[in-house]
Amino acid sequence: MGWFSKRKKKTEAPPAVKEDIWVKCAGCGAHIYKTEWEKNIQVCPKCNYHGRLTCRERQHLTIDPETFKELAGDVTTSDPLGFVDGKDGSYSDKAEATKKKTGLKEAVLVGHGRLNGLHVAIAIMDFRFFGGSLASGTGQRILVGAQYALKHKLPYIIFSASGGARMQEGMVSLMQMAKTCAGVAQLREAGLPYISVLTDPTTGGVSASFAMVGDINIAEPGAIIGFAGRRVIEQTIKQKLPDGFQKAEYLLEHGFIDRIIDRKDMKDELHRMLLYWQR
Ligand SMILES: [Zn+2]
């Protein structure tokens, strides 16, 4: 029988594409079962790499169930420069698309709630929203959190995750560095604790402002923390930087941060620190 007159063999429908059941660890490259990865709060069981969490995941890990109340949830992006990037189009359009994709209105979630029963104010950055960049809305939300803590005499905890200032908002975004620092400085004057937790990555304008001025500065293991990136520094100073430079462990060794705490212990350790303050 000629090829063309051959009856087509009934082909089976391709199996439905299963949801990816593996997660590839960005730390060691190992493939981990997704269920195991999630059970282990997105920490690699082989190399202890701490994956990036969304602000809501972090909130659920840190704040007691059903106690979280969001603050400044309507504060969102503004476009003071009418910024248009030749390649990416307008900032406004990109912001709308990002909001739709992430379900967030800004790169930080701010609110108050209970941490093992203790009332705290909290801000949690989300790297998915413009790389967790600091912009007018982000700065305003962080300030509202500080003011809430001040008014109600609460400790303030900020989880940072950021690539730096949001360049699309130009100078207005840089001003947020001073604004957020002024906000947390008021807590110090009032004798209220401000705990800064640096998660992967905390860089640029955020590392150069509120993230480094906590009464206690904590990091998650392996987090990249620094101002300019490794390559930029190496090209500027024409020198090779040491291994592990800008990793949380290196910063701890050189006295830039106070502690490194594993994700699974973070909530209880924060609680323990706050109990010292309460005494
Ligand atoms: Zn790993």
Image (tube, helix red, strand yellow):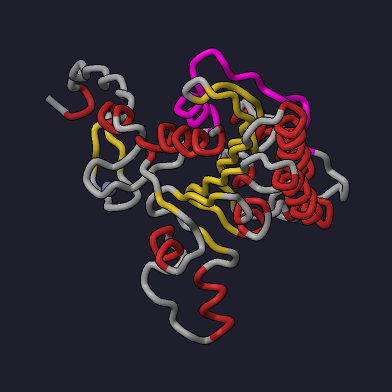
Residue placed at 82% from the left, 39% from the top? 78
Q: Is residue 169 at least partly visible in the picture?
A: no
Which residues fall within the magenta stretch?
A: 55-77
Q: Look at the image and tell me whether residue 194 can be seen.
A: yes
Q: Given the current orientation, which residue lies at the most extreme left position?
A: 1
The residue furthest top is: 66
Task: Identify which residue is drawn at 53% across, 34% down.
Answer: 279
Residue that appears at 66% across and 51% down: 210
Q: Quadrant of residue 22?
A: top left
Of 249 and 133, nearer the camera is 249
Residue 216 falls inside the magenta stretch: no
Q: Out of 140 and 182, give the one closest to the viewer.
A: 182
Name the image quarter holding the N terminus. top left
The location of residue 103, given as percent across then percent down, is: 62, 26
Q: Is 195 on the left-hand or right-hand side of 22? A: right
Residue 204: x and y in percent read 63, 59
Question: Compared with residue 187, is residue 72 higher up or lower down, i.e. above or below?
Answer: above
Question: Residue extending furthest bottom?
Answer: 238
Residue 257 vs residue 169: left or right?
left
Determine the residue located farthest toward the front in the rendered image: 279
67 left or right of 20? Answer: right
The quarter of the picture where residue 107 lies is: top right
